[in-house]
DNA sequence: AGTCTTTTGGTACTTTAGTATGAAAGGAAT
DNA sequence: ATTCCTTTCATACTAAAGTACCAAAAGACT
C-alpha cells in the first residue's frame, strides 16, 4: 500500500550488495594482514562492530521511510501553497482554525475584519475541497501540513 | 526532555553487556569447534549476520521509544473517560467531530436525533472546558486521545 | 426502592459559520 | 502597462453550531 515499496526493494538489494562486498573485502584482507598481526579476537571484534553499525544503519533506513514522508509533508508551508494552492494568509488562518480559534478570534489575532476571515476561510474550503473548518483541519492534518 | 531517558541509558548498558557476552562466547567457541571444522569464512559470516541482526534490533529499540508513548496515550478511550469524564457516546461524537462530521452527519451516522448530538456536544464542551468543537478537537489531540 | 449517570430527545433562542457577490488597493510577472 | 493574484472589506443571506432548560427511559450501584 505505501508508495515507498519499490525503493524499499531497491534498498534491500543495495544493502545486500554492500554487505557482500564488505565480507569479500574482509576475506581478502583476512590472511594478509590482520589475522597474523593483531590476533583473531581483535579482528572478530572489528567485524562485529562494523556489522553492528551497519545493522543499526540498515535497520533505521529500512523501517523508517516515515522520515522522508514526514519531511516531505510536515510543517512545510510551501507544501500547502503548492499542493493545495493556499496562500500565506490562508495558511495562517487555517493554522489558527486548527488551534480552535473562532473567526472573530482569528480576526482579532491578525488585526483583520471578521468579513476578511470569512472570505479567507471560504477560499480555504473551496481550495481544499471541503465544506467545514473541521474537515479542513482533518484533511490538513492527514496531509501533514499541520502539527 | 523525554521521560524515556533513563530507560534508554539502561537499554544501552544492557545492549553493551549482551554484545560483550556474545563476543566472549564466540571467542570461547572459536578455537574449539567452528574454526577448524567450517573454516574461517563461514565463521566470520555467522558473526557478521548475528551482529547485523543485533544491530537492527538494537537500533530499532533505541530509536523508537515512541511506541510506548503512543500506546500509553493514544486511542485509549479509558483516558477520555477518566481524565475528562467523557462517556462512551460523548467520545464517539467527539471522534466523529474530529473527522469533520457536522452535527447532522453525526446524527445520521449514529441513528440519533440532531438534538441529541447537540446535547452530547454541549456536554462534551463543558466537560472539556472549551467553547467550540474545534477547541475540543485540538485539546483532545494534544491530550493524545484522538488519532 | 431509590439515586445517579447515561442516553435520548424536545423547544426556543442566540451566536457563529459559511455562501454569494462585489469591489478596491497593492505586488508580481510578462 | 496590464493582467493576475493576493489581501482586504462590505452587504445580505442561509445554514449550522451552540446554549438553556426541560424531560423521560434504561442501567448501574447501594
Image (spheres, coloured by chain):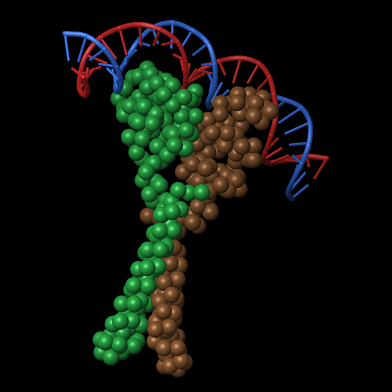
Chain colours: A brown, B green, C blue, D red
Occupied quadrant, residue A113? top right
Please tell me which residue lies in front, A130 or B13: B13
In the visual, does A110 lie left or right of A66?
right
Occupied quadrant, residue B46? bottom left
Please tell me which residue lies in front, A57 or B106: A57
Return the x and y of residue A24 as percentages of the image width and height: 42, 85
Quadrant showing the C terminus of chain B:
top left
Q: Is residue B13 above or below residue A49?
A: above
In the visual, does B144 lie left or right of D14?
left
Residue visible at 38% across and 18% down? B119
Q: Is residue B52 above or below residue A131?
A: below
Occupied quadrant, residue A97? top right
| Residue B34 in view here | yes
Residue visible at 43% across and 93% down? A36
Please state the total of marks drawn on the protein image: 0
Residue visible at 60% across and 24% down? A104
Return the x and y of residue B87 as percentages of the image width and height: 33, 27
Residue visible at 64% across and 27% down? A107
Return the x and y of residue C22 as percentages of the image width and height: 68, 24
Return the x and y of residue A60 as percentages of the image width and height: 44, 63
| Residue A9 in view here | no
Amino acid at each position: 500500500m505505501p508508495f515507498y515499496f519499490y525503493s524499499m526493494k531497491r534498498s534491500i538489494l543495495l544493502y545486500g550488495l554492500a554487505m557482500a562486498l564488505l565480507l569479500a573485502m574482509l576475506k581478502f584482507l583476512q590472511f594478509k594482514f590482520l589475522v597474523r598481526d593483531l590476533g583473531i579476537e581483535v579482528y572478530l571484534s572489528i567485524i562485529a562492530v562494523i556489522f553492528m553499525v551497519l545493522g543499526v544503519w540498515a535497520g533505521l533506513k529500512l523501517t523508517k521511510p516515515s522520515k522522508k514522508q514526514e519531511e516531505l509533508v510536515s510543517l512545510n508551508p510551501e507544501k500547502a501553497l503548492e499542493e493545495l494552492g493556499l496562500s500565506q494568509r490562508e495558511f495562517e488562518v487555517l493554522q489558527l482554525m486548527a488551534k480552535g480559534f473562532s473567526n472573530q478570534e482569528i480576526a482579532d489575532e491578525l488585526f483583520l475584519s471578521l468579513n476578511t476571515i470569512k472570505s479567507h476561510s471560504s477560499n480555504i474550503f473551496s481550495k481544499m475541497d471541503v465544506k467545514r473548518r473541521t474537515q479542513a483541519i482533518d484533511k490538513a492534518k492527514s496531509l501533514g501540513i499541520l502539527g
